[in-house]
Image: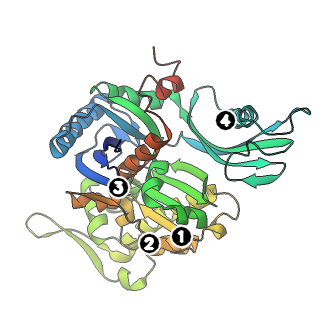
């Protein structure tokens, strides 16, 4: 029987935009983007919902646009989540085989996996992802399960992502009121990495940094497996606010000045003269020394990148062979690539989107990296599962104290 195509939908409720992407996975595993529904976010701060009614209205608008653009009636989504409360940690589970059982069985491997997944987390947190990294048998690393081999001690190494249950549940509740089901929730940088990195880049070592309006998400891959992930509650809005404090401009005008005149690099040639912001009639609304403007921008973005670097494992940057991949709206800031190279000393890239087609060219914009990544994640999820569990499957089990 020929393999049928399948439609997946990714939803990102971000600080600046609420975005729904509808993608079709074809029989040959190629992905076609059928439509994008986007609206400016309201009621969301630092990636988390702060005004439920406003966020709900934005989601409803984005859903209508996505259905109109794709000519698809949407029933469920893969939901990206972020926020400073979400943490990724590595943990290894060790199981010693009984003396009379010299060969590793499925039960032995599952015992090690269970121990590895059971990381101690705060009482109000829930597990989002238990991602297997690799196995060890008597101290020797294995990329796949060592089942069937002789050994005495089997270990499973996991990357476990967890966050505050109530905050995640608020996002799920918002989606269900559309009404839509949630096929799975996905930590945003893990979704972004599905789009940004191929297998070879993960093997060589790569870091994805997604810097948006309210948050900076990151995911580090070394030796083909995820090594670190997290979220820093700082983004482009903080740069805009810094400009607002220096110039006294309203936030909207400070944002426009940042985009049209700012530069994050340390190139002195780009900091000569005066930066001007004109009004609707073409008159100068504000003038600021360009060196001052660029220094304000640079200081905040450099601080943000250094915070990311500080959260990575010791000596991890030296192991990044494929480079650092920048996504998110703030990554479009002039001079940002040069600044990132200065902080990390590794090659800096903007991810490409291989094997993705569609009627809209906008999906190549780095602002859509997470939403597109959700489609890739859904494709992998669908391959590894007989069927997505839905809101009353895996997601409901994650939130059993909340879902009645």
Q: Position of residue 248 (x, y in %)?
A: 30, 58
Task: Determine the residue positioned at 41% across, 60% down.
Answer: 327
Task: Measure the alpha-carbon separation of dots 3 and 1.
Answer: 25 Å
Q: How many marks overall?
A: 4
Which of the two discs, 1 and 4, sits closer to the camera? 4
Foreground residue among 265 and 103:
103
The residue lying furthest to the right in this view is 99
| CB atoms of marks 1 and 4 within 8 Å | no
| Rendered view: 217 above or below 293 | above
Going from N to C along the chain, the mark reached first, 3 or 1, is: 3
Q: Which residue is mark 3?
A: 30
Q: Secondary structure at mark 4?
A: helix
Q: CA distance from mark 4 to mark 3?
A: 33 Å
Give whichever of discs 1 and 4 has the lower sequence position: 4
Instruction: Point out the image quarter for the N terminus.
Output: top left
Instruction: Select label 3 or label 1 by which is in front.
Output: 3
N-term-proximal mark, 3 vs 2: 3
251 or 111: which is nearer to us? 111
Label ID, residue 337: 2
Q: Please name the residue that numbered disc 4 is placed on.
A: 117
The spot of residue 72 in percent (x, y) is: 20, 39
Give the number of the disc on residue 323. 1
Residue drawn where x is 71% and y is 43% of the image: 91
Disc 2 to disc 1, C-alpha distance: 12 Å
Q: Nearer the viewer, mark 3 or mark 2?
A: 3
In the current view of this chain or complex, which residue is farthest to the bottom?
269
Circles 2 and 4: CB distance less than 8 Å?
no
Mark 2 and mark 4 lie on one chain; the one further toward the N terminus is 4
| Residue at screen point 21% across, 34% down | 73
Instruction: Choose the circle earlier in sequence order: 4 or 3.
Output: 3
């Amino acid at each position: 029987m020929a393999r049928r195509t399948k439609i997946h939908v990714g939803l990102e409720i971000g600080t600046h935009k609420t975005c729904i992407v509808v993608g079709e996975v074809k029989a040959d595993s190629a992905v076609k983007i059928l439509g994008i529904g986007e609206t400016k976010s309201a009621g969301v701060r630092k990636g988390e919902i702060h005004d439920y009614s406003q966020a709900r209205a934005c989601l409803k608008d984005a859903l209508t646009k996505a259905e109109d653009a794709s000519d698809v009636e949407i029933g469920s989504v893969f939901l990206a989540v972020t926020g400073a409360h979400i943490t990724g940690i590595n943990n290894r589970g060790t199981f010693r085989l009984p003396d009379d059982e010299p060969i590793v069985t499925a039960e032995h491997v599952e015992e090690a996996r269970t121990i590895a997944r059971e990381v101690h987390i705060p009482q109000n947190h829930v597990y989002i992802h238990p991602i297997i990294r690799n196995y060890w048998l008597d101290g020797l690393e294995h990329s796949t399960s060592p089942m069937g081999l002789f050994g005495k001690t089997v270990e499973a190494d996991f990357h476990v992502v967890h966050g505050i249950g109530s905050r995640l549940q608020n996002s799920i509740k918002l989606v269900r009121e559309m009404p839509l089901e949630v096929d799975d929730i996905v930590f945003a940088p893990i979704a972004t990495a599905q789009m940004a990195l191929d297998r070879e880049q993960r093997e060589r070592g790569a870091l994805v940094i997604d810097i948006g309006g309210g948050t900076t998400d990151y995911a580090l891959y070394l030796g083909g497996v995820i090594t670190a992930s997290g979220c820093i509650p700082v983004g482009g809005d903080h740069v805009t606010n810094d400009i607002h404090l220096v110039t006294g401009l309203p936030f909207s005008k400070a944002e426009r000045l940042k985009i049209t005149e700012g530069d994050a690099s340390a190139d002195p040639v780009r900091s000569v003269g005066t930066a001007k912001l004109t009004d609707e009639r073409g008159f100068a609304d504000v003038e600021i020394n360009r060196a001052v403007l660029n220094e304000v921008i640079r200081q905040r973005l450099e601080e943000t990148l250094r915070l990311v670097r500080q959260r990575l494992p010791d000596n991890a940057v030296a192991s990044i062979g494929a480079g650092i991949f920048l996504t998110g709206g703030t990554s479009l800031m002039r001079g940002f690539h040069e600044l990132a190279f200065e902080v990390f000393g590794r090659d800096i890239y903007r991810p490409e989107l291989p094997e993705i087609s569609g009627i809209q060219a906008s999906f190549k914009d780095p602002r859509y990296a997470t939403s597109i990544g959700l489609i890739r994640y859904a494709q992998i999820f669908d391959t590894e599962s007989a069927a997505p569990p839905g809101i009353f499957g895996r997601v409901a089990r994650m939130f059993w104290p909340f879902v009645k």
